[in-house]
Image (cartoon, grey):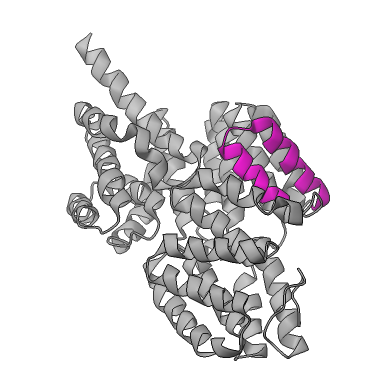
Amino acid sequence: MKDTYELPISTSTVAAGDAFNRALVAFAGFDADVVERVQAVQKADPAFALGHCLWGYVMMLAYSRAALPVAEEAARTAAAHAAGATPREQAHVRALERWVAGDVDGALREWEAILATSPRDLLALRLAHANYFWAGRGAEMRPSLERVASHWGDRDSGFLACLAFALEETGDYEAAERTGRRAVELDPTEVWGAHAVAHVLEMQRRSEEGVAWLAGLEPNWNGKGAFLHHLWWHRAMFHLARREFDTVLDLYDRRIRNLQSPLVTALPDFHVDVQNAASMLFRLELRGVPVEGRWSELAEKAEARIGDQLSVWTLPHWMMALAAEGRDAQSGLMLKALAESENRAVREVALPVCQAVLAHRRGEHERVVALMTPVRNRLAELGGSHAQRDVVAQLYADSRRRVERVAA
């Protein structure tokens, strides 16, 4: 059996092979039914090691401590069936084992080794892409893709979408926009490509074009998963730049953080959703826009996630919610957990940024400046994009203006 990309897979059943290929499409397309697609692979062939790996990968991409035991069990099951797997599949088992053990660098080495011998391995390609991004190593996304580009050509929309985003994050906006638009031209449902172009338009302050770009593509997004909320966040960012605050709040309530939607109900504390919501509320408040009671449900979820540090970039957003609701005891517990973390980026960067978020809410602007100044050049270590991390830059700039105003 082979997958869609002509790579051998160690299942002897046609049903499992077909299910695996459908799961790959759902995985790469950010589809809402990816969990069901992956579970169908396991059901079709319980001895298929790579099927269990894919399940573990999907669980790990939640970046939630609650999903970790499920991913660990998937790694154990995959390892138990790995003897008859291909060397490439066995490397995936090792990558998952390293990831669940907290060794992201080790997992990245495994994925890169897979790509060196199997450059059309979609899982290795997309997982390296995602983990470079969230591990604060975004500059490595581009060379990772460029090393295998000749094997993908210029007609694979998914590869072009990843390349477009990597080009944008390294500042090559012209090439990023051209590549992203090509990806969407090839496949109008390609949300990662739409996202890459939205980033270019955001960075170049082309707000009117940004609204039109996303509005025009919306009819193609049926069946997509929670990533849609991030595309709506980008749409709201364009309206925010135009000071259309009522529109931003409407998008927040109906699209970004609709607590009644099936997607939010299924994943109420999904890390990207929390980043979207908290950063948008914070940006609105910086502009003097009241957000009423919208912080409350985020603070409840933040309190439940104290000590969960799998998503470093989400940590300042949890603190935004706790600080906004005046939950001082919980804020203290969170800061204590950050100070005791084994992750250097958490201790040395996320901790002072979270302290600064809390100080800003308390009006201690000199303290904000003192905390942020030494780490301003290390913010990329938190993960996330240039556009996302700008909220921290805005916090620092606001406090600095206030300190300078008092001094004058």
Q: Quarter of the image containing the C terminus? A: top left
Image: magenta residue range: 160-187
Specify whether 258 is left or right of 291. Answer: right
Which of the two residues, 191 or 99, is positioned nearer the viewer here? 99
Q: Is residue 334 visible?
A: yes
Residue positioned 37% across, 47% down in the render: 317
Residue positioned 76% across, 78% down in the render: 2
Answer above or below: position of 366 versus 30: above
Q: Main secondary structure of the magenta part?
A: helix
- Residue 221 point in image, percent of width and height: 72, 55
Residue projecting furthest to the top: 408
Which of the two residues, 217 or 109, is positioned nearer the viewer here? 109
Answer above or below: position of 378 versus 62: above
Specify whether 255 is left or right of 77. Answer: right
- Residue 35 point in image, percent of width and height: 59, 74
Specify whether 137 is left or right of 186. Answer: left
Answer above or below: position of 115 versus 346: below
Answer above or below: position of 305 versus 46: above
- Image quarter of residue 236: top right
Q: Is residue 273 visible?
A: no
Q: Quarter of the image containing the N terminus? A: bottom right
Which of the two residues, 206 or 238, is positioned nearer the viewer here? 206
- Residue 280 point in image, percent of width and height: 46, 40
86 is within the stretch colored magenta: no
- Residue 67 point in image, percent of width and height: 43, 72
The tally of labels here is: 0
Residue positioned 49% across, 62% down in the render: 109
